[in-house]
Image (cartoon, grey):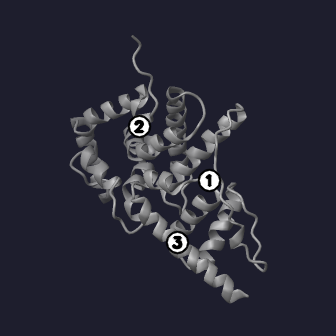
Amino acid sequence: MDAKRPTRASETELIRRLEAEWQVLARSRWLRERLQTWAAEDPRLTFADGADLLAEAQRRGVSSWEERDQVLAALLERTPDDVLAKRVALQVVLPGVKSLIDRIGAWDVEERAARVVATAVDVLTWCASEPARTSPSFRVYVNTRRRVLRAAVRERLEPIVFVDDFSQFHAGDDPVEYGAEAGRFDDLVEWVQRRARVREDTARLVVLTRAAGVSVDELAAAEGVDPQTLRRRRLRAERRVRESLVVAR
């Protein structure tokens, strides 16, 4: 009798292999010694072993993505010249990678896992060479998702993506072209940030979940936070946008 075919990311051969590999690598002498070298040069990487590093890098209850992403940012700085740093960085973002594998409706799950992981590795390299103000976990998740969806569309395997209407936030005296492409997306983030007087990461939360087809649960899984925390943060920002538009009238 044939083995049951995988239906979720965690059941795929690639993800199971990556997780098993990490269990060995996390407490290996190789990584412990490399961490000692890294820590001498960068205090953000002061950890006894990979397990401690991963726990901190995926910690919940932080005040912002930037705070939690200090470890990932430090790893990305080393990625261009250190293959081990890239492997550890991949493990840090793996929860978001698995979320994408489960949520994108194209290809069978094994092929989808291979495509998403390969894309995430490419995006990690790109993020390391293209510094930005945005938190690295956010950039890795969004750009991996965008590239994989584009590949699916090119192959005419159009996954279902629900895009919410964001037109209620348009102010007649402050026009914005809506969309998730780089320039327009950033314009909309800036507009929400200015109108709501919130941090950039909160503005991006609003735009991602209201205009770019990313669900709150999906983003929460990628960021390792409680979905209700993100919903409350989004609600407060949207309320402030509405209030600013009323005043503008």
Where is the N terminus found, in terms of image quarters? top left
Q: Residue at x 50, y 32 (%)?
A: 113
* The one of 190 and 9 positioned closer to us in this rendering: 9
Q: Residue at x 27, y 44 (%)?
A: 50
Mark 2 or 1: the one toward you: 1
Q: Is residue 199 visible?
A: no
| 2 or 1: tag closer to the N-terminus | 2
Q: Residue at x 48, y 65 (%)?
A: 231
Amino acid at pointer 3: Leu
Q: CA distance from mark 3 to mark 1?
A: 17 Å
Where is the C terminus found, in terms of image quarters? bottom right
* The one of 213 and 137 positioned closer to us in this rendering: 213
Amino acid at pointer 1: Gly
Q: Secondary structure at mark 1?
A: loop
Q: On the image, numbered disc 2 is attached to which residue?
A: 83
> Around disc 3, counting alpha carbons within 10 Å, would you say few (fewer than 14), some (14 to 19), or many (20 or more)?
few
Amino acid at pointer 2: Val
Q: Is residue 1 above or below residue 206?
A: above
> Around disc 1, counting alpha carbons within 10 Å, would you say few (fewer than 14), some (14 to 19), or many (20 or more)?
some
Q: Position of residue 17 (x, y in %)?
A: 36, 28
Side of 95 relative to 29 (left or right): right
Tag on residue 235? Answer: 3
Q: CA distance from mark 2 to mark 3?
A: 41 Å
Q: Secondary structure at mark 3?
A: helix
Q: On the image, numbered disc 1 is attached to which residue?
A: 213
